[in-house]
Image (tube, rainbow, N blue to C red):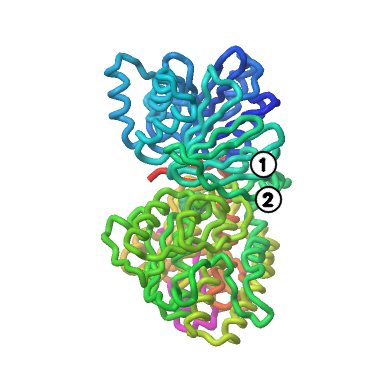
Amino acid sequence: MCGIVGYVGQRSAVDVVMGGLRRLEYRGYDSGGVAVVGEGGLSSAKKAGKLANLDALLAEQPLPDAGTGIGHTRWATHGGPTDRNAHPHLDDTGRVAIVHNGIIENFADLRDGIERSGRELESETDSEVVAFLVQERLAAGDDLAEAVRIVCRRLEGAFTLVICDAQNPGVVVGARRNSPLVVGRGEGENFLGSDVAAFIEHTRDAIELGQDQVVVITADDIVVTDFDGAPAETTEYTVDWDLSAAQKDGYEWYMLKEIAEQPKAVADTLLGRHDADGLLQLDEMRLSDDELRGVDKIVAIACGTSYYAALVAKYAIEHWTRIPVEVELASEFRYRDPILDQSTLVVTISQSGETMDTLMAIRYARQQRARVLSICNTNGSTIPRESDAVIYTHAGPEVAVASTKAFLAQIVACYLLGLYLAQVKGAKFGDEIARIIDDLDRTPAAIQRMLDDADVVRKISAELAGATSFIFLGRHVGYPVALEGALKLKELAYLHAEGFAAGELKHGPIAVIEEGVPVFVVVPPPGRGEVHDKVVSNIQEVRARGARTIVLAQDGDDSVVPYADHLIRLPEVPTLLQPLVATVPLQIFACEYAAQLGHDVDQPRNLAKSVTVE
Ligand code: AGP
């Protein structure tokens, strides 16, 4: 997901824009650039690689002082991460500079038209065509806002565009369709950003832009219209976290900070959801109790870690409500001709609220008349805006690409939804719900215990140094935990790591077990009887074939001791809540192991924090 910054005001546009881009680095990128417009016209600089490369270029060839500027950090889609493909892109007359996030699906036709008119584009990107098209409209006499609106009506696909004009200092124009753009309202200055981190140190007064809207910012004014020029409705809000919340607070990695924030993320997500009698109230619900009583099927849709949260939720929601829950990968969902109708509740789960696969699944589901409820961690993002209802997780900004605190908060939010449905449908008595809520209220302390025991995991990480292939096993809600543990290690250590349902071992995967292969096993609480005993047998099976077993088992469960090369103790919690504690050591392990390998834990290679392309 690209980072975008726009600025108009009295300060140095280069400084404001570069500062904003630095705060957006976490989104993952492979080039950066900045353009400014002053009395002397338009100047720009761009460079492949990290922002340090752009800083070096600017030190060598400083841009003129100006109060109008735009900037970009690019995560390559069309065209490799090169200087030429970096943004901003200018038209061949040098009048217009644009930065873009998203994919312009009809760019090839637009490019052909520009080249047939005898003009030459220099990059391989889809974005560059926009600079040429806007310049054509300006040359035809349109002002910058109208020129952008006309061009936006010709574009297909997903785009956030921020544009400036050499002949128009003091104005920056932004536009969005299917991709995020927020406005920051300052005093005598205004900002644009792909998210609020771009301008949070200057102002927390934000305006979220809706679909197909164009915004014009000057130092003193913000005007929003639709693509046809009609005034548009906007939503003003105050950002509820400050920049320090998005800083590392002394941790080596954002990921470590966010792992440590999990007790608070869970507690904050639970906060204010139930009254003194334990009855649930989900005020962002926006779906009536009658509508919820009519739900006869739930389809949970997400990607990556959020998909694993949905897998965990399935066990609890079906158990509490007896409503069938299908769990779908967003990128597969709409291509399998799914069966949906107005009695289907689609629940999407997304930390960023901008994942394109998930957003497109929402659009498809709504076309099929299903109701959509989103569980999201990012206020003002696109997915909640396009859903019928939302339950926000309150995990705070999650900066590290590898999702951690959002995952636990998502599970909690899913459980709140399941309990709310059980309450509305009368599938559970009030006292039963209150008891489960009490158990949930105790999980922050249980999670904190796992954080306090982190050295046990760090020691295991050091002892496993050199291993290059890892297996993760679990049953029941421990199975999605095994999948998540494998994903964390894969995305951070760039090594083979695979999760299996422990019962699946004998159907093939056990063939990969050989001397020394590390196998993590999440053991259900002993109270689970048969399921627990079967997992203990699975540990014996892999150990008999030479595996090195790292066993996660509840305090006092000594049945596993003879088969555990390494033992990670879990606090006693109800089975359905075990993912909230068992996941933590797997997160810590992945972070430690990757750091041991010298990797950038917060910005793993090839990955971005939010995947806003399909
Ligand atoms: C998780 O560690 C990954 N970064 C990735 O799988 C992520 O969970 C996925 O892309 C979904 O993102 P979202 O929750 O923002 O929609």
From what the image shows, is residue 525 above or below residue 590?
Answer: below
Q: Residue at x 57, y 64 (%)?
A: 566
Q: Crowding near pointer 1: few (<14 within 10 Å), some, many (20+)?
A: many
Nearer-the-camera pick, 104 or 167: 167
Identify the secondary structure beneath mark 1: loop
The residue lying toward the viewer, choosing from 198 and 61, is: 198
Q: Name the residue under label 2.
A: 241
- Give percent across and percent down for residue 258: 63, 53
- Looking at the picture, how far across and down is residue 229, in whole percent? 46, 37
Residue furthest top in the image = 40
The answer to whether the residue labelled 2 contacts the one labelled 1, judged by CB atoms less than 8 Å apart, is: yes
Which x, y percent locates residue 72?
53, 31
- Would you identify the image quadrant in which residue 193 lies? top right
Image quadrant of residue 507? bottom left
Identify the residue at horizontal 53%, vertical 44% (top origin): 209
Q: Which mark is residue 200?
A: 1
Is residue 12 placed above or below 397 in the rendered structure? Answer: above
2 or 1: tag closer to the N-terminus:
1
Magenta region? 514-538
Q: Which amino acid does label 2 sit on?
A: Trp
Taking the spot 50% from the left edge, 80% from the top edge, the residue there is 424
Q: SS at mark 2? A: loop
Left or right, 156 with respect to 527, comes to left
Measured as percent of width and height from the top left, residue 373 is found at 47, 64
Given the image, on which type of amino acid does mark 1 rest? Ile
Q: How crowded is mark 2: few (under 14 residues within 10 Å), some or many (20 or more)?
A: some
Q: Which residue is located at x 40 percent, y 64 percent?
A: 500
Residue 516 in view, yes or no: no
Considering only vertical position in the picture, is 367 above or below 229? Answer: below
Q: Residue 31 magenta-drawn?
A: no
Q: In this view, does 25 lie to the left or right of 342?
A: right
Image quadrant occupied by the C terminus? top left
